[in-house]
Image (cartoon, rainbow, N blue to C red):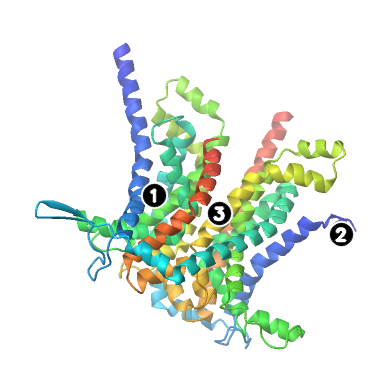
Amino acid sequence: MPTRFTATLKRWRLGRRAVIAFPLLWLTLFFLLPFALVLKISLAESTVAVPPYGPLLEYADQTLHVFLNLGNYLFLLSDSLYVAAYWGSIKMAFLATLVCLLMGYPMAYAMARASARWQLILLLLVMLPSWTSFLIRVYAWMGILSNSGLLNNLLLWLGVIESPLRIMNTQIAVVIGIVYAYLPFMVLPLYAHLTRMDNSLLEAASDLGSRKINTFLKVTLPLSMGGIIAGSMLVFIPAVGEYVIPELLGGPNTLMIGKVLWEEFFLNRDWPVASALAMVMLLLLLIPIVLFHRYQSRELEK
Amino acid sequence: MRALRRANFSTVMLILGLVFLYLPMVVLIVYSFNASRLVTVWAGFSTQWYGELFRDRQILAAVWTSLRIAFFAASMAVCLGTVAAFVMTRYGKFRGKTALSSMVTAPLVMPEVIVGLSLLLLFVQMAQLIGWPADRGMATIWIAHTTFCSAYVAVVVAARLREMDRSIEEAAMDLGSPPVKTFFFITLPIILPALAAGWLLAFTLSLDDLVIASFVSGPGANTLPMVVFSSVRLGVSPKINALATLIILAVSLATLLAWYLMRRSETRRQQMLKQRDA
């Protein structure tokens, strides 16, 4: 019965399309479309209204007026505060990513070398902090780093320093906070790559007389490059836009773009400038995001 | 001596790294039992801050709000993420695949301020055009959390779908089982542990989110992170330490349980392999 067969096939194909459409539509509506709106409102004029921005299109006297206000972008360039905030964010995120990599790589390496039973325990131990509250983990450092905090008390008691160090409300505190909060996200992809590595390659290298450090640099490191990229992007990209850490640990003098955007939006209620800030941030992060995406989609489709 | 010889550089770094990760949390827990209001001065053991925590109506209401949002967001994210993962791993090539894979992975790294701002602008625009959502609150937070959590679920589930033995699915299809039936009776039971892991991950991510919820929430809905943040901004408070201790305790117990279950299933698998060999 060919007709029934084709009918079934048609139904399957329809079902297949519906299955594809569900996530595609949801994400288009709630992820892609919002970015278009950010672009749109970054080109609008700030007004005192609800919502606080002017229209882009206006139809009057049989003419369609299109208002594209580039003023918000020019304003970002003209005020050195914003340029400094972008630079500060990138600098701090880069530094924190580097520290995370230098700490995380040996950690992941040791985990991948452990016995199977220990690997699971160590993996859970590394991930557990990230399942508790992010906010509370940043808050923990407030009590440790402050002038009368535990770190200063300890160092004073040990006699290492004579007067309390000022760490809280500095850029160092922000870097410590980012490293602390994002370290598990660096270790995880590195561990995944190192544990999947074929040990026979290392044995071959050592059989052929390669020294340990040489084997590491020429075999292990290149093979774990995917993990290095994924881990670094997982730390760097969110860290650039970080709001909570600079707000709680950085004090008023630390300029980071996530915090500036937040203040522009919630305190100044200037939605168009906040949108322009977001667009420029997205532009700066485009290369890292594409890099991460290329790696991740390869993992997804493999 | 053997232990000393084995203590090479990477092992030392691992131990130091774990100390770095756990020391601040230990400090947090210890000072939740401090009698003094100051976090820096130890004034004897006391559980008074736990009592104050449980008398704080605002925090309790926020906990309830957050738990409800997290439950519904995690459940929806599992549906959405599983379908996305299934489509990505099983459907070969189709139009919109690149777009879908980009949109599935992008929320993993997108700065929260951008996601929050863009979703708020969407909700404002929707309210203007179709009159919904008239009030922002739990529903808008639910949509926002579902969207970014589904990305994490998709990654977890896709990993399981990829390593799963496809021959069972193919056998069912060869025997005439339609795709929907094959999915629900063959694929789903096999990937169930991954769905549970994805659900738990989404649940904790939703509970934890401050920035996105702050953007898309209205005056009505205050989640736990929003209440904690407004209190923490004013400085350290032992009540927050008590709350932190309870959160760490709950997460540790859940992790311990997960570890126990994983170990048990692993032991059982080993036993089965042994029996088969014998």
Q: Quadrant of residue A198?
A: top right
Tell me which amino acid carries mark 3.
Leu
Q: Give the left or right position of residue A202, taking residue B83 as reference.
A: right
Which residue is most to the left?
Answer: A61
Of the two numbered discs 1 and 2 in the rendering, the one whose residue sits closer to the viewer? 2
Contact? badges 1 and 3 (CB < 8 Å): no
Q: Residues within 10 Å of mark 2 (few under 14, many from 20)?
A: few
Residue B94 appears at what percent x and percent y? 41, 31
| Disc on the earlier residue, 1 or 2 | 2
Q: Secondary structure at mark 3?
A: helix
In this rendered view, identify the residue nearer to me: B237 or A84. A84
Which residue corresponds to mark 3? A234
* Quadrant in which the C terminus of chain A appears: top right
Which residue: 55% across, 54% down?
Answer: A234
Tell me which amino acid carries mark 1.
Met
Which residue corresponds to mark 2? B4
Residue A301 appears at what percent x and percent y? 52, 36
